[in-house]
Image: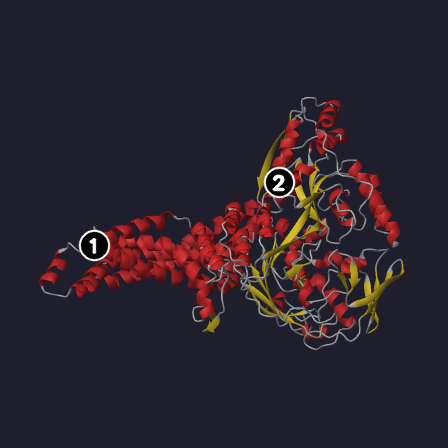
């Protein structure tokens, strides 16, 4: 039905019915953004989720900010350095005030970090970013010393996810206990230092922010920003065309050519940090989704994994399924981002070589395989899985697709019900250790490795490299180690990257959007085009 | 009447409990909400900690028991997604849905009864036939298609009305409503018309059939013979008698309009409970889904009860038989 809606919305354009967004609602400096999903709370420490994280950038600041390419930039900390292997010093910005006039200092930071693990009912806690902190100390009101148990090069990146709240404002809100999420949602505690102030939040309806004219980073562009959640693709596009909203995120791929052709609309696209990959069960001989191999698990054989990789025409998937709005992937993070190897190239499509490898591995007639995939989580996820299945069938692996809605898919995947599955990974840290640690490191609860390695790929040499990288403070050296690790897992075909998602935004004419690799939709990224 | 009332109440309570149990167990069987909610960056220890924080590590019978005990105290649990009481989330959204359903109901009844009466009184005229043909269209057009077409014509092309969302609201007795602002009404028109169309057709057909039957009854003939003006005959004697089936059906349909306006709410990004339900199902937000369905059952029970009362107002015979029973 989704496609039908979108086609209809697009059809109007083709018919020339659309007059476009000439009479937008935005007076001088008002901005209305139609978003596909809304935050589940205003509390910046409640739910580690894309829309929530995008919102917190408006109202709050972190010590360190991530720019559109997820490089670290000074935020509430003007500078930071590692004093020794386990000690960091953050020099805080002076003269910054919260929206209610209270002063920002190191006590606010310490209070914030202590609160993070103490948010009741949090469905996805930010404590994963603060676990590594052993102790904190305010040397003076604007100098913060942080101790970690050992070298922790990712600490600045991790802290870039933690929004600083005002201790004076929130500390007494809940009778001495940690402040409640509800207090943030109704606005009374939603007091930050960020470029926009909380105005109104009606769940499912609107979220209104107003300008913080005293923002330390310069006066924000918009006087008033309204976010409207419009989950369905067709109506979201229609809202842009009718002038109800000025900007929308995630316009459906099939409508992009029509939107681009419309003189009243501009489309902005950029590479994201999200890779779509196939993971393969490499754990034991007993695997659920394979038939015709005499009880063996073919994916324990690297030749079979290589054959599968060579059998898939990534360029064709990008071109035909993704409408060109994706980039074929050679590793788990696009080149140019921290830790991505420049030595790797996209696997060439070579079905003949794939067949030969299969025969060599002892499967000249192939086998039967089921690929698991979600059908509502990633852009065109099920269609991509179908295409991959077709390619595999061509080299003799008779493949079918088992698609389900995300809630069902993730449960089944986590119960190891798939031999091969399609999923995606966005690097929250914007660097290579994130996908390596989560997707291909040997699962280890104590170290926090392999949380999403449901293919149970295990390579001790790779684990050692990752561990070494995560203990190396020197930036250049760490990057080299991560690049090596990336090459190692790709050359071992431990996981098969397919493509990187490209994220799009559509605006009415006269506005520009700076695409972000983290896929966040933010008012700060919208500028008036000259 | 009192016995009848108590019996109804008992049945209703039973339905509520059985339904809650079915939904609770059903959603438990689908999957674990933590798999959907948690950041993929979270490691295994954090995943486990979250499962415990939300109380999902307990065995099913224990979760069920806790739920039932709390439900007796009026606490239907906290949303896994929003961390707020499920009932509060629903009640926050309910006014939006109620006003949408109400406006749609008013449109359906006024337009439906008027057109149905007309078609019933002049069944062979061109207008009468056109009305009946139109009602077939109203039955067969899918809701989401009609909604999109209305958006395309009135919002995208003509730009007379907004494409979606709820307009400005004012607080009336603590309830936020958009019925009393111009902006609010302009946002309400398209979704209300979309939601009303099917019901309008239904009412047209009922009213027409009723009119044709009633118009031939002896008491109508007698009224005419007595020399009453034709408008008094139609608007008092005929209208009152055709309203009984209309009230029954509309009563039932009002429940479904409130509970299942999902498609319309989705197309128009209307912040009502239908959208909340869909989001909650996708995220396996069990407390909200269970609370929502319990409230739906409750609304149906209320409406049915109101319909019974209305009968007795419209039809004195019902009053008499109830009194005897």
Vertical side of A98 occupied by B73: above or below: above
| SS label for mark 2 | helix
* Residues behind callouts 2 and 1 on a single chain: no
Q: Which residue is mark 1?
A: B122
Vertical side of A309 occupied by A124: above or below: below
Residue B233 is situated, as x and y percent measured from the top left of the image, at: 17, 63
Left or right: B89 as drawn, with respect to A298: left
Left or right: B261 as drawn, with respect to A244: left
Left or right: B190 as drawn, with respect to A110: left
Residue A469 is situated, as x and y percent measured from the top left of the image, at: 85, 49
Image-quadrant location for residue A405? top right
User: In this view of the protein, which residue sits in the foreground, A145 or A273?
Assistant: A273
Q: Quadrant of the C terminus of chain A?
A: bottom right
Rendered residue at 28%/53% (across/down): B131
User: In this view of the protein, which residue sits in the foreground, B218 or A149?
Assistant: B218
User: In this view of the protein, which residue sits in the foreground, B73 or B108?
Assistant: B108
Q: Is residue B72 visible?
A: yes
* Residue A321: mark: 2
Residue B195 is situated, as x and y percent measured from the top left of the image, at: 41, 56
Specify the subunit that label 2 lies on.
A
Estimate the spatial distance between the alpha carbons at disc 2 and disc 1, rounded to whole Å: 57 Å
Rendered residue at 42%/48% (across/down): B142
Image-quadrant location for residue B242? bottom left
Left or right: A335 as drawn, with respect to A201: right
- Give the number of marks: 2
Image-quadrant location for residue A344? top right
């Amino acid at each position: 039905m989704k496609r039908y809606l979108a086609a209809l919305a697009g059809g109007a354009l083709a018919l020339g019915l659309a007059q476009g967004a000439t009479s937008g609602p935005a007076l001088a400096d008002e901005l209305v953004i139609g978003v596909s999903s809304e935050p589940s709370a205003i509390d910046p420490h409640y739910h580690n989720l894309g829309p929530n994280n995008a919102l917190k950038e408006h109202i709050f600041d972190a010590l360190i900010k991530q720019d559109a390419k997820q490089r670290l930039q000074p935020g509430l900390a003007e500078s930071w350095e590692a004093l020794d292997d386990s000690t960091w010093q953050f020099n805080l910005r002076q003269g910054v005030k919260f929206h209610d006039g209270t002063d920002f200092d190191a006590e606010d930071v310490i209070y914030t970090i202590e609160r993070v693990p103490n948010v009741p009912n949090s469905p996805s806690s930010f404590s994963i970013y603060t676990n590594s902190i052993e102790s904190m100390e305010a040397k003076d009101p604007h100098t913060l010393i942080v101790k970690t148990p050992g070298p922790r090069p990712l600490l600045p990146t991790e802290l870039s996810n933690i929004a600083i709240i005002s201790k004076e404002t929130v500390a007494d809100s809940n009778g001495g206990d940690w402040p409640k999420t509800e207090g943030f949602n109704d606005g009374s505690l939603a007091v930050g230092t960020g470029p926009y102030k909380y105005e109104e939040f009606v769940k499912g309806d609107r979220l209104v922010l107003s300008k913080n004219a005293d923002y330390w980073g310069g006066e924000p562009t918009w006087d008033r920003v309204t976010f409207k959640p419009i989950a369905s693709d067709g109506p979201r596009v229609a809202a842009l065309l009718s002038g109800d909203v000025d900007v929308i995120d995630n316009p459906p791929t099939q409508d992009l050519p029509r939107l681009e052709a419309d003189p009243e609309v501009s489309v902005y696209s950029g590479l994201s940090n999200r890779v779509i990959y196939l993971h393969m069960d490499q754990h034991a001989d007993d695997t659920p989704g394979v038939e015709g191999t005499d009880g063996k698990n073919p994916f324990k054989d690297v030749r079979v994994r290589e054959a599968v990789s060579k059998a898939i025409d990534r360029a064709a998937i990008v071109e035909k399924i993704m409408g060109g709005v994706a980039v074929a992937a050679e590793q788990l993070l696009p080149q140019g981002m921290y830790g991505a190897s420049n030595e790797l190239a996209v696997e060439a499509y070579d079905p003949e070589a794939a067949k030969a490898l299969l025969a060599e591995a002892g499967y000249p007639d192939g086998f039967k395989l089921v690929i698991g995939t979600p059908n509502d989580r990633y852009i065109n996820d099920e269609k991509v899985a179908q295409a991959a299945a077709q390619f595999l069938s061509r080299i003799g692996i008779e493949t079918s697709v088992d698609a389900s809605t995300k809630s069902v898919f993730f449960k089944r995947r986590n119960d190891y019900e798939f031999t091969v599955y399609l999923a995606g990974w966005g690097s929250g840290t914007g660097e290579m250790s994130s996908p390596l640690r989560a997707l291909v490191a040997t699962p280890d609860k104590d170290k926090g490795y392999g949380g999403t390695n449901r293919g149970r790929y295990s390579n001790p040499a790779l684990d050692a490299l990752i561990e070494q990288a995560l203990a190396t403070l020197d930036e250049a050296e760490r990057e080299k180690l991560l690049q090596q690790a990336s090459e190692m897992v790709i050359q071992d075909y431990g996981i098969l990257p397919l493509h990187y998602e490209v994220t799009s935004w559509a605006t009415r004419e006269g506005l520009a959007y700076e695409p972000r690799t983290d896929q966040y939709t933010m008012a700060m990224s919208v500028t008036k085009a000259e | 009447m009192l016995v009848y009332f108590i019996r109804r109440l008992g049945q209703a309570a039973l339905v509520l409990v059985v339904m809650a149990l079915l939904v609770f167990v059903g959603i438990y069987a689908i999957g674990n909400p933590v798999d959907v909610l948690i950041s993929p960056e979270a490691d295994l220890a954090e995943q486990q900690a979250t499962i415990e924080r939300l109380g999902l590590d307990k065995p099913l019978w224990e979760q069920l028991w806790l739920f039932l005990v709390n439900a007796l105290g009026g606490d239907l649990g906290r949303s896994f997604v929003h961390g707020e009481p499920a009932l509060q989330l629903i009640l926050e959204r309910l006014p939006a849905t109620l006003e949408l359903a109400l406006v749609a109901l008013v449109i359906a009844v006024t337009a439906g009864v008027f057109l149905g009466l007309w078609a019933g009184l002049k069944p062979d005229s061109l207008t009468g036939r056109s009305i009946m043909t139109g009602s077939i269209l109203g039955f067969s057009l899918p809701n989401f298609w009609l909604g999109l077409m209305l958006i395309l014509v009135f919002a995208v092309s003509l730009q007379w009305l907004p494409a979606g969302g709820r307009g400005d609201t004012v607080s009336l007795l603590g309830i936020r409503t958009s019925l009393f602002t111009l902006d609010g009404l302009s946002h309400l028109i398209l979704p209300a018309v979309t939601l009303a169309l099917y019901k309008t057709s239904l009412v047209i057909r009922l009213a027409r059939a009723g009119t044709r039957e009633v118009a031939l009854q002896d008491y109508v003939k007698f009224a005419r013979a007595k020399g009453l003006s034709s408008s008094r005959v139609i608007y008092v004697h005929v209208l009152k008698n055709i309203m009984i089936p209309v009230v029954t059906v509309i009563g039932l349909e009002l429940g479904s309009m409130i509970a299942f306006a999902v498609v319309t709410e989705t197309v128009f990004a209307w912040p009502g409970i239908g959208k909340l339900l869909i989001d909650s199902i996708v995220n396996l937000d069990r407390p909200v889904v269970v609370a929502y369905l319990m409230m739906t059952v409750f609304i149906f029970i209320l409406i049915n009860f109101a319909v019974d009362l209305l009968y007795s107002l419209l039809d004195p015979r019902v009053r008499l038989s109830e009194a005897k029973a």
